[in-house]
Amino acid sequence: MDIELNRQGEDLRIVVDGNIDSEGGRKLGEALQEAMGMEGLKRVVFDLSTVRTITSSGIGKIMNFFKFIDGRSGSLSVEGISEPLYKQFLEIHLDRIFPVRR
């Protein structure tokens, strides 16, 4: 699994390529720690279009990052998500917490 952090001003796009399993969750955690160190972020977009599966730990890491960015008056959204992951996010109502768009 690969993760790219693409920053432009106050915006950060996090592109995840591959499944978020136990190893991927570790990499995701490291990338999100790096993102938390970035000053002045206002909008964070996750691109999960190539992620087919995610563990509960991976979802927890995204939720913790949401709390971090929300606490700094920022926003988080998912724009680009695979169909299986989209269904999973809807089932656990993540779309009620932050925008999830295919």
Image: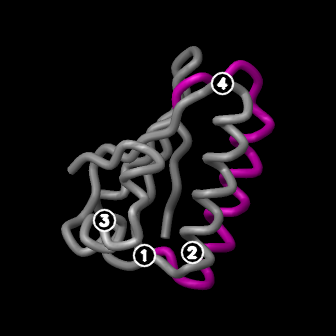
Mark sitting earlier along the chain (1/2) = 1
Q: Nearer the viewer, mark 4 or mark 2?
A: 4
Query: Residue tagged by mark 4?
Result: 73
CA distance for labels 3 and 1: 18 Å
Query: Residue tagged by mark 2?
Result: 24
Query: Residue tagged by mark 1?
Result: 19
Q: Nearer the viewer, mark 2 or mark 3?
A: 3
Say few, some or many: other residues with alpha carbon within 10 Å of mark 4 (under 14 / 14 to 19 / 20 or more): few
> Which residue extends farthest bottom?
22
Q: Nearer the viewer, mark 3 or mark 1?
A: 3
Can you give x and y, in whole percent of width and height, for residue 86 in the image?
27, 64
Say few, some or many: other residues with alpha carbon within 10 Å of mark 3 (under 14 / 14 to 19 / 20 or more): few
Q: Determine contact: label 1, label 2, CB under 8 Å.
A: yes
CA distance for labels 4 and 2: 28 Å
Provide the secondary structure element on which disc 1 rests: loop
Residue depicted at 44% across the width and 58% down the height? 16
Query: Residue tagged by mark 3?
Result: 90
Q: Which residues are magenta?
A: 20-43
Q: Label 3 amino acid? A: Leu
CA distance for labels 1 and 2: 7 Å
